[in-house]
Amino acid sequence: MRRTLTVLIALICSFLPAAPALAADELRSAEVTFRGGGGLELRGTVLTPAGATGPLPGMVLVHGSGAGTPRAKLRTEAEAFARQGMAVLIYDKRAEGYSLTRRDYGELADDALAAHAALRSSPGVAPDKVGIWGLSEGGWVAPLAASRSKQVAFVVIVGGNAMEPLRQQTWAVAAGLRKAGVTGQVPDRGVPAFYRFLAGAGMFPMPWHDAQAVLAKVGQPMLGIWGAHDLLTPPQETPGLLARGLKHDRYTLRYFPGADHAAHLTFDGGVTRDPRLAPGYPEAVGTWVKRVTSGDLPSAETVGDLPRQASLTVPVPPAAFWESAFVQVLALVVFLVAFAGYPVWALVRRVRGRSVQGVWPARVLALGAPLSAFGAVAYLMYSVISGGKLASPGPVVAGRPVIWLLFQVLAVAALVAAAFLVPVARRARRSERVRLGALLTGAVVFLLWALYWGVLLP
């Protein structure tokens, strides 16, 4: 039902009037080519207001996350900023060297600096008045680029971050689940544990990028913008972190009501993005850029009401050895060997024509524990993939997804069966005792594993 409603809202938004169409004489565009990080050729477009006199301040727009994002994705913003009297460069984001599991903010910063150099050398642009604007992931990239070059005149970030990427992403997915009505161990323990596993396994790029250390090296004036309904970047915590990270007070923090992560309008609390920009957003950026490039620098300014988060972020430190990706995978291997070994051993005996006498606690343990363990991991993986602002946890009872409750019941049943199995194993013959001992060893490992992942916690 929720997804259907979201689709309907998106369809309605698609019929709403977008930014006014450009007359042919409103803006001029020019194509540019430049070499980014590693010598990769990148292509872009420079937009300038037609009929502008005198050198213009300029701004390079840096994309959010995603490989090979075309420059057209930021065309609305670029045109709106150009109408404010700026030269604006948008470029196609690299796909080479960038993926879900591999990216380098330093390389992206080199791309942004190359685009910055291209804009500075464009006709009609004041080379000492060109800055960098970054959206979302670009909120890590733009400050990094500025910290590497004093030729960057200013920095603007929208929906940007001032914390570690792993902490931000963990919050976004957990907050999405909470918004869908989920409470308890899935968002509180399971999601952070799964992201730490991904980071430890090298499947989450740059998880502990030190945004604070980068901000400390940024000497340029900065404008930070957040929508009140940002569901991807923590809009309540991030502005304060940004201000604390900078070692100067030449910054402005601005908040837009009714806006989402990208400062677009939203009518459903940030889930659906309207094609229109928040009212006053382009004008605010244009006015601020003109101010700072003319020498009128801000002094710790704040405009608007600080957004509120339904939940705060939590630290997501690197995993200790006992909770590392290696140990977690090893635990799953132990489950396969210990629990799958029980029926396999029985099958082998039957094939050889020997009798097998099963006991119900062993069967419950051998079936329930692996179903709970692998099912919980699969569900957390699904939650991470489908999480964020449009989480789909399935039916929820008392704040718990029904499928998670099922895994919890299986875990309890398996461990109760293990308790009944202990005296049976003591009385068993030697060969049977070995088989049941393997099961009980798996049960001990499963108990520790289930406590860590929150499967056995309320």
Image (spheres, rainbow, N blue to C red):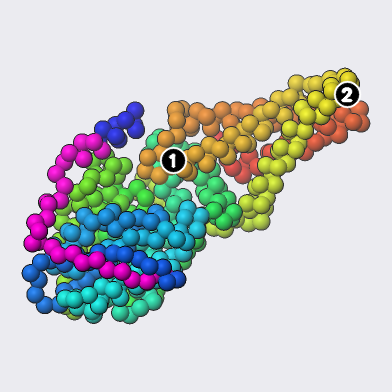
Task: Examine the rendering and report whether any part of residue 314 can be seen.
Answer: no
- Res. 375 image quadrant: top right
- Tag 2 near tag 1, CB within 8 Å: no
Q: Comparing marks 2 and 1, which lies closer to the viewer?
A: 2
Task: Examine the rendering and report whether any part of residue 192 can be seen.
Answer: yes
Q: Quadrant of the N terminus?
A: top left
**Magenta part of the chain:** 10-37
Residue 277 in magenta? no
Q: Residue at left 63%, top 28%?
A: 410
Q: Which residue is mark 1?
A: 386
- Up-down: is 451 above or below 405? below
Q: Position of residue 33 (x, y in %)?
A: 31, 69
Q: Position of residue 217 (x, y in %)?
A: 39, 76
Sequence-first tag of 2 and 1: 2
Q: Residues within 10 Å of mark 1 (few under 14, many from 20)?
A: some
Dot 1: element: helix
- Up-down: is 92 above or below 406? below
Q: Is residue 51 left or right of residue 240?
A: left
Q: Identity of the amino acid at label 2?
A: Arg
Q: Identity of the amino acid at label 1?
A: Ser
Q: Which residue is mark 2?
A: 352
- Up-down: is 293 above or below 261? below
Dot 2: element: loop
Seen from the viewer's position, the closer of residues 271 and 65 is 65
